[in-house]
Amino acid sequence: MGSLLIKNALLNGKKTDILVEGNRFSSLAAPAGTVADTELDAEGMAVLPAFYNTHTHAAMSLLRGYADDLPLEKWLTEYIWPYENRMTRQDIREGSRLAVREMIRTGSVFFSDMYFDIEETLAIVQEYGLRAAIGVTFVEAHAKSQRAEKLDMLRHWVDPTGGLITLTVAPHAIYTVGPELLVQCAETARSLGLKLHIHLSETKKEVDDCVREHGMTPVRYLESLGFLGPDVIAAHVVHVDEEEAAILARRGVTVANCPCSNMKLASGIFPYRLLRDAGCRITLGTDGDSSNNNLDMREEMKFAALLAKVSSGDPEIMPASEALAVATRNGAEAFGIEAGQIREGMLADALLVRLDDERMQPCHNLVSNWVYAAGSSCIDTVLCNGRILMKDRTLLVG
Ligand SMILES: [Zn+2]
């Protein structure tokens, strides 16, 4: 991997030349006369951190618009699950391709996925050169042999990209995975040093059913099983009380907020203040295309901020800079990726955003424009691990 000089980019209010050597930022103020293998002219563009999407189901892009405006239970059992039962491996591959192309074009360089036939998604991630944490998904309904195959894959899989892709252990949810399998997933993840990825407290029904069946709420139930820990990425976490927020914080659980999906399925309102003030790391996810209906993290970031404000009645909560951190740095940190900030020594992931777009003008506050005004079509260039994935809005990969 060679060197890349990004010339004339706007960074922290100043025009500068940025040098990338190998896969890291080596200088954010390269001296005049610096030469590199590749040069990129970023005149009229700002450099901003790329997005890290911490909860999605990439291949579900094939179900975009297939079933909308339904409650979660009916949507899943009458539409999504029957459709998924008919999906072939080729479908999974093409759905993953559509999703990955969409993600790069909307500025994401990482996604945390949960689906099946993951070899197809892995192949697409490798082809397109972005980062991913691909969940090996467990549900109770799988046959024993299938479960053994999955455990075997977790033990023996080797990342062909040398650092861009990891696997996660992904028990789907407490209502699709029984207690023994949940414990087995946690033990497997911990013995292999992998993250756990689960849907948690997404709907009121999930909470009510859990109380009826186990005599306690979902967070308390997982706590009683010894499941919770700093390696857990919990998606949604909409219906929790103060004590549950404290449990999640104490265990170091990362929460993936998916505001668009929660609003569209009317699952509930993410308790941003409660979880943040308890000390949870909050990240951002789009959930699948079937319930969002896109994977656009810039849009998600705006929705997250607006929902936090209107639900708390406090316009000062989740200011633009905090919304940006949730969508970028927090997600990278949760997965141990040394990225998410434009800093010397960090992995070279970044976006070049066009300032000549009307939505980026006037520029009283760049971050405000980016969070509240822009659209992902303002993104000109996407850099991941020192490699240009998109330039002039054209994908250079795949
Ligand atoms: Zn989901």
Image: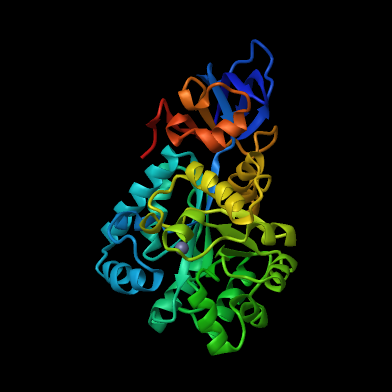
**Height in image: 20 above or below 177?**
above
The scheme the figure's colours follow is rainbow
**Height in image: 31 above or below 309?**
above
Residue drawn 40% across and 46% down?
100
Number of marks in the image?
Answer: 0
Task: Tell me if I can see residue 21 in this picture.
Answer: no
Name the residue nearer the viewer: 339 or 191: 339
Q: Quadrant of the C terminus?
A: top left
Q: Quadrant of residue 196 in the image?
A: bottom right
Residue 113 point in image, percent of width and height: 47, 58
**Height in image: 329 above or below 65?**
above
Q: Quadrant of the N terminus?
A: top right
Is 45 on the left-hand or right-hand side of 341?
Answer: left
Residue 355 point in image, percent of width and height: 52, 22
Residue 15 point in image, percent of width and height: 64, 17
Name the residue nearer the viewer: 31 or 273: 273
Residue drawn 63% across and 71% down?
191
**Height in image: 68 above or below 97?**
below
Is 206 on the left-hand or right-hand side of 242?
Answer: left
Residue drawn 64% across and 49% down?
330
Residue 93 point in image, percent of width and height: 32, 55
Q: Quadrant of residue 36 in the image?
A: top right
Residue drawn 34% across and 54% down?
61
